[in-house]
Image (cartoon, rainbow, N blue to C red):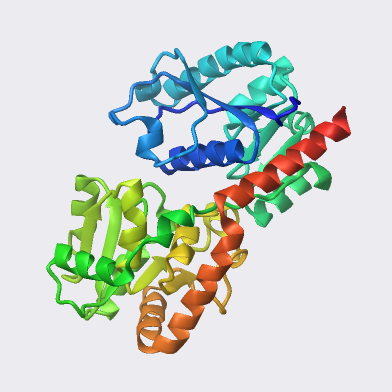
Amino acid sequence: MTSNGVKLLYIAPIRLPTEKAHGIQIMETCGALSRAGADVELLVTDRKTPIKDDAFDFYNIKTKFNITRLHTPDTVSYGRLGYLFYVIFFGLRAALYARRARADVVYTRDPVTFCIFSVVGIRPLAWEVHTAHPGVPRAILRTALGVVPITRGLAAWYGARGVPAGSLHVAPDAVDLQAFSKVDREAARTSLRSRLGMPPGGKIALYVGSFGLYAWKGVDIAKQAAEFLPEVTWLFVGGSAKECEELTHEATPNVRTLPRAGRCEIPTLLSGADVLLLPNKSGDPASERDTSPMKLFEYMASGVPIVASDISSLREVLDENVAFLVPPNEPKALAGGVRRALAEVSEASAKAGRAQSAAASYTWDRRAENLLAFLQRRITMRS
């Protein structure tokens, strides 16, 4: 380690910028680690992206760090084999780069990169995990400096796979509180209703995020729930034009959509709603065990009441003191939760206030400080 802290090389076989959520998460993590004192370099592919903005501007990241792009043949469009070739080619080139870079920690959230680096002997190597990967051999898991799951449920899964408790560090996703600190809630409410052509007092239940990428996110449940509460506008934000059209097809008239919002728009958009929706389904480990949705922490920071599915992954952060929890997979129950949040104004306001206070424990900076302290302890133990 240098006198200024840990030199950290973050490896990500992605195009950058990307409209997908992992781009936000990686850039926020690198920015926060830089602020925490690490010397961060992000290594990505040179795969072309339709987004012309600078990565720091696109994600509204104020803290600069080095971004290096490695030439990688763009074979992703050729299906699964094409993607596998792309990520392996990048992984091998990145391993050569990492060997020359001599970082104190090489960090990735990609399982193929992790396996390649482990096999060729790149050390120290830390792996952030966002789902269970049974295909990663236990012998490779044991080579990690640290395994960083985003939920306690994932930590338990990897613990059962033989990762020692001391090598595990749970790091839920997080939020930039400053982005919400200057939002004028009344102005946000007025603006959103004007945009939708609604009367000033109209009620909005809002979902932000992917429409069709993962069925377990429960967008279909929320769409069906709108039938039970026709006096409320159920607004879904985050799809392409085609996805927006598909979502409103055969939906009730109170289902509305807006296309994917820019990063800077999210705080004002959330603050303009009356209720925020997390309708995750049960029955899928990705939903029940693995997910730590960034929008959850943004919802909390907004001070708007939250109605969420009562599942274990969300229970790691939420309880009845900060949100209205409803049975998952049940449109009528979700509608009932929204109805209660709108009717019980005092209770809803108190829950939202407590959620907003709790969001202070889930900032990107606090996450990075804890993660860096964990990595430094692990480096010291191994030296």
Q: Nearer the viewer, residue 89 or 32?
A: 32
Q: Nearer the viewer, residue 9 or 80?
A: 9
Give the quarter of the figure containing the C terminus: top right
Q: Residue furthest left?
A: 197
Q: Position of residue 228 (x, y in %)?
A: 28, 80
Q: How many marks?
A: 0
Residue located 41% across and 89% down the image: 344
Q: Nearer the viewer, residue 99 or 5?
A: 5
Give the quarter of the figure containing the N terminus: top right
Indicate whether 76 appears above or below 144.
above
Residue located 26% across and 64% down the image: 235
Q: Is residue 160 left or right of residue 131?
A: right
Task: Identify the image quadrant of residue 270.
Answer: bottom left
Q: Is residue 368 visible?
A: yes
Q: Position of residue 58 (x, y in %)?
A: 35, 37
Q: Position of residue 279 (x, y in %)?
A: 42, 65
Q: Position of residue 220 (x, y in %)?
A: 34, 62
Residue located 64% across and 20% down the image: 116
Q: Is residue 139 left or right of residue 276?
A: right
Q: Is residue 177 left or right of residue 215?
A: right
Q: Is residue 324 visible?
A: no
Q: Is residue 309 left or right of residue 133?
A: left
Task: Identify the image quadrant of residue 345.
Answer: bottom left
Residue located 49% across and 69% down the image: 309
Task: Identify the image quadrant of residue 56.
Answer: top left
